Image: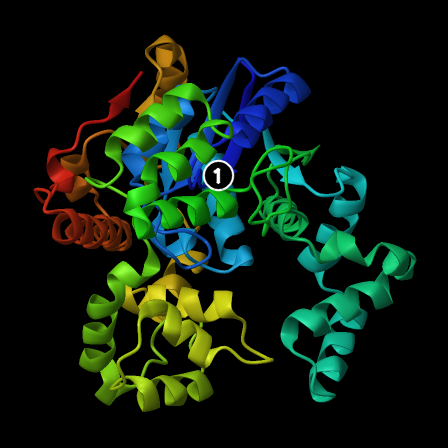
Amino acid sequence: MKVAGVVAEYNPFHKGHKYHLEKARQATGADKIIVVMSGDFTQRGTPAIIDKYERTRMALQNGADLVIELPSCFACSSAEYFASGAMSAMAALGVVNSVCFGSESGEIDELYRIAEVLANETEEFKATIKAELKNGRTYPIARNNALLHCIPEFAEKENIIGTPNNILGIEYIKALIQMNSTIRPVAIQRTDSDYHSYRLDQGFASSQALRQTLRMAENRPENFRDVIDRVRMQVPADVYETLFERFGNRYPIFPNDFSAMLVYKLLLERSHGYTSFVDVGSDLSDKLIKVTNKAYTFEQFCEHLKSRDVTYARISRVLCHILLNVRQVDMKKYRENGNIFYTRILGFREDAEDLLGEIKKNCKVPLITRVSEGDKLESAIARRQFDRDVLATHIYESIIASKYGAGLMNEYERQIIKV
């Protein structure tokens, strides 16, 4: 059985995602496709617009055969951590032959060469980064300049290492190299709108554009029908049906919905500072201490704290780490011990039970199909990672409950999605 892996957020699922799944199957000749998907929080450090169970169903109805959850500590982290967690999850399944990812360039050989430099870090590469940092460059700029120094022919193709999907693709390949994995990376050239595009009127829309449109629908309830209809042409029919039916009773969820909870957590931790959380240095911790008693929303915190050296996205991830209690000490232990300590299945197609059987035979870590099975994990580090995932989901569900007056969904009572 040939099995291809895809890493995704589906925030929300759209026609570009369906196209990618179709191309992944074609490019690899895969019999089955496994998706490693972020749970209720995403790599930008923001909550998903709709919960992980609905997004799992969307994926299974449109090309995926099985969906597993990427642990939250990796799902809302930097590209490097996100990619290493996702590739570790793929490898742990023991059945994945290839991993397919979207790429602005689609040039797998070029991406592989860059990844090799980053994975091996020659003395020349490290010396160049050190010199660049000494000259006041930020780390991302220093690293890019070091890459161009080591691979000068890429000077004319600098966009290869500066576009979002290529960046993630390079990190996927780097992680596979460092793991000595036999999983083959496959780049599929993107044909949809720019990753950051807000436009719905050309090609495949970006998830960003869809989220922005759904926010407009929330802010202008009197024009709901007109606004939500703009989404119809950009998503599969079954996805539109879900987005239409669930709107205003289970979603949409936005970062500012977590503002009060975030301020509470910031105040709770204020006396200790924030350097124990992932990606928080002393300077940023000091800035956070100074602003915690101000009436900022989640997004206002990001705007206020971003700077030339610290991006909006990094601030958002930092706030997400604080909210979800993602600590440096835990992430260090995860990284030192293989990243992934269990595999949790969110859903599968009923005609993919043969795939599930192969995973059960070959999986290198405990396989979880019911949340209660997480309580039986033998190692303390595995239980800690799992408990953090359950906490993240309950935090997300508590916001749904308070925003929409819905009953609080207990993660232990949720059923695996079958399509």
| 65 horizontally vs 129: left or right | left
User: What's the residue type where badge 1 is placed?
Assistant: Ala
| 30 horizontally vs 338: left or right | right
| 412 horizontally vs 159: left or right | left
Q: Is residue 50 above or below residue 145?
A: above
| Rendered residue at 30%/63% (across/down) | 256
Residue carrying label 1:
8
| 366 horizontally vs 196: left or right | left
User: Does any portion of residue 184 appear in the rendered image?
Assistant: yes
| Snapshot colouring | rainbow
| Rendered residue at 71%/43% (across/down) | 104
| Rendered residue at 13%/53% (across/down) | 402
Disc 1 residue crowd, few under 14, some 14–19, many 20+, Cα 10 Å: many
State the image coordinates of residue 336 (x, y, percent, origin top left): 44, 59
Quadrant for the C terminus in the image? top left
User: Does any portion of residue 97 appear in the rendered image?
Assistant: no
